[in-house]
């Protein structure tokens, strides 16, 4: 009864809304559109007005031209872009309801990966995976991911993650690390993210940094997959869809990446097979073994599940750490204040393990991380398909419309953030010195039931690495004048990460 009523009231809201608000989807402004291809010519090399790999910058230009809501049609699909935090709250903050009639957040993405897994790799996969699945199937997968990410579950990885961070951090000035430090520290961040993956998911120590120069090593193949598969996903999701007709180069890249993920995951699952049944490894408290102990024994579901986890957690953590290190190292005042906090929490440096209490106490460090991800969030946009008619900036937008939430733009506009280009962790002190930021302006992990399920694991890894690095070294930025982003599916640094690392002896 309740659900029928809420459904009825939703429809009547939409009807009343459409009567009162005359403006509809077709009235939303945006760049001009051509037959069949829509706005695609605006993105062509040389003649195009916009550059697809500089999405944040060009979205700011569109914001100035069209306002906080604009639309674009690409190959017949209309995308509505949102920049106003109230609109973002309307879409992401929606209560999905409950019970059998719950309307869950819907997203269309990773179309090729879904096709590959449900056609070419269907003997090893149960379905397309968490990113593109919607409805009740998504609820089941999400529930499983979420349980694994509970704070009490991931706390057990602090010690091993710290060991991996210590190994890398203590050797930054060693001869073996010279090649990475002098060419691009991003290599070291990739190695850290990959090691953390192996350790938390499978309970294995991978030592990715030792394999960095060997493109045939397993860890290098995983790093390639995480970057290239994501890189190929943006254009195949929003491009011409020719991959549906024949095997395009981008299609082949995604297929190759999906196969690499499968190889790594199935090799580890096979090691746990006893008489055809998955059995947890004794003494191993990895996520995989914990799930098996919890009764998750469907081989194909585990392949999809674990492949998604590996795919989501390497470039995401490495790119986010890049910006965190860049912003702290280019702001000496902040770096000194951070060091004082970390020294106060851990006087023995590399000699003492990082504990959950130390991480909890590092409040200024967390504000530094939050501020870096406000200026340079990983995702330029979060996609949704509207599950009901919605009023956005006064326009009546119908159910089924594709929405792109441009938080990376919102969080860099003076309309919503004071001195948006300045790195000021103190803006989160809430002592009245800075205007409070609308809660839907900066959302690096998104918001709501469909937000990043790996957030806690990612934050834990980044907290440990940042703690270790800035507790033990003073970083000096030696790279480009300004580090910004190139957008593929996500934002990645547009220049090599170059630092000088000076060891810290004591507080002064
Ligand atoms: C700093 C690192 C990371 C950032 C900034 C980040 C950010 C995001 C964002 C913005 C989304 C889209 C959410 C939405 O549509 O509302 C997302 C989704 C997701 N992330 Fe992360 N992520 C990070 C690391 C990780 C890690 C380490 C994992 C797994 C171990 C992970 C797993 C996922 C999954 C599975 C989804 C899809 C969730 C769903 O569809 O229900 N992420 N992430």
Image (cartoon, rainbow, N blue to C red):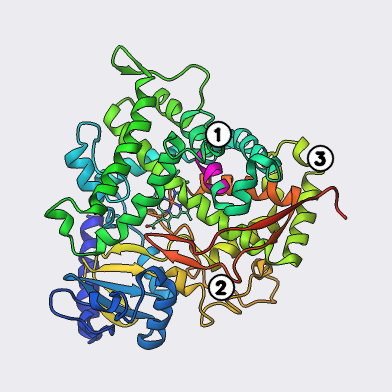
Highlighted range, magenta: 188-194
Helix, strand or loop for disc 2: loop
Badge 2, how many Cα within 10 Å: few under 14, some, many 20+?
some
The residue where tag 3 is placed is 348
Q: Is residue 425 left or right of residue 280?
A: right
Front: mark 2 or 1: 1
What secondary structure characterizes most of the magenta part?
helix
Residue 90 visible: yes
Label 2 residue near ligand 1, CB within 8 Å:
no
Label 3 crowding class (10 Å Cα cut-off): few <14, some 14-19, many 20+? some
Residue nearest the observer in this picture, 134 or 129: 129
| SS of the residue under disc 1 | loop
The foreground one among 414 and 7 is 414
Residue in the picture at 59% in, 63% down: 372
CA gap, disc 3 to disc 1?
A: 25 Å
Q: Tell me where residue 445 appears, x and y as whole percent.
A: 47, 57
* Residue 371 coordinates in the image, percent (x, y): 60, 65
Q: Residue under label 1, please give it.
A: 207
Q: Is mark 3 within 8 Å of ligand 1?
A: no
- Image quarter hosting the C terminus: bottom right
Tell me, yes or no, if residue 135 can be seen here.
no
Q: Which residue is mark 2?
A: 437
Spatial separation of the CA atoms under disc 2 and disc 1: 41 Å
Q: Nearer the viewer, residue 19 or 204?
A: 204
């Amino acid at each position: 009864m309740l659900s029928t009523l809420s459904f009825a009231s939703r429809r009547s809201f939409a009807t009343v809304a459409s009567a009162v608000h005359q403006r509809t989807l077709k009235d939303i402004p945006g760049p001009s559109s051509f037959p069949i291809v829509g706005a695609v010519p605006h993105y062509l090399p040389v003649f195009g007005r916009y550059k697809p790999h500089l999405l944040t910058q060009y979205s700011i230009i569109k914001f100035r031209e069209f306002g906080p809501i604009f639309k674009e049609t690409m190959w017949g699909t209309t995308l509505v872009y949102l920049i106003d935090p109230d609109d973002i709250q309307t879409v992401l903050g929606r209560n999905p309801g409950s019970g059998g009639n719950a309307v869950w957040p819907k997203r269309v993405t990773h179309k090729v990966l879904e096709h590959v897994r449900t056609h070419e790799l269907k003997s090893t996969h149960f379905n397309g995976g968490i990113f593109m699945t919607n409805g009740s199937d998504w609820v089941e997968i999400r529930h499983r991911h979420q349980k694994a990410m509970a704070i009490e579950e991931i706390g057990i990885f602090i010690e091993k993650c710290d060991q991996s961070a210590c190994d890398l951090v203590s050797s930054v000035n060693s001869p073996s690390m010279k090649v990475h430090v002098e060419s691009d520290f991003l290599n070291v961040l990739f190695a850290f993210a990959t090691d953390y993956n192996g350790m938390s998911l499978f309970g294995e120590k991978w030592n990715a940094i030792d394999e960095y120069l060997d493109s045939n090593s397993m860890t290098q193949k995983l790093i390639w997959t995480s970057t290239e598969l994501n890189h190929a996903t943006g254009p195949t999701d929003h491009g011409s869809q020719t991959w549906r007709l024949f095997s395009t180069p981008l299609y082949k890249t995604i297929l190759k990446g999906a196969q690499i993920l499968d190889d790594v995951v199935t090799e580890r699952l096979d090691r746990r097979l006893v008489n055809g049944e998955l059995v947890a490894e004794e003494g191993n408290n990895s996520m995989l073994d914990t799930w098996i102990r919890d009764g998750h024994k469907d081989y194909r579901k585990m392949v999809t599940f674990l492949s998604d986890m590996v795919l989501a957690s390497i470039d995401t953590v490495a790119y986010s750490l890049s910006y965190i290190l860049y912003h702290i190292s280019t702001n000496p005042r902040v770096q000194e204040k951070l060091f004082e906090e970390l020294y106060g929490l851990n006087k023995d440096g590399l000699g003492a393990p990082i504990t959950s209490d130390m991480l909890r106490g590092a409040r200024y460090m967390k504000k530094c991380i939050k501020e870096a991800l406000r200026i340079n969030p990983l995702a330029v946009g979060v996609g949704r398909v509207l599950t009901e008619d919605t009023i956005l900036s006064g326009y009546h937008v119908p159910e089924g419309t594709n929405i792109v939430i441009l938080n990376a733009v919102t969080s860099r506009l003076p309309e919503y953030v004071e001195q948006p280009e300045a790195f000021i962790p103190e803006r989160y002190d809430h002592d009245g010195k800075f205007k409070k930021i609308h809660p839907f302006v900066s959302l690096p992990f998104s918001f709501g039931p469909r937000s990043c399920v790996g957030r806690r694991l990612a934050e834990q890894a980044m907290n440990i690495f940042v703690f270790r690095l800035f507790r033990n070294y003073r970083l000096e930025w030696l790279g480009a004048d300004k580090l910004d982003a190139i957008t593929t599916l996500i934002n990645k640094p547009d220049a090599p990460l170059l630092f000088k690392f000076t060891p810290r002896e004591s507080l002064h």
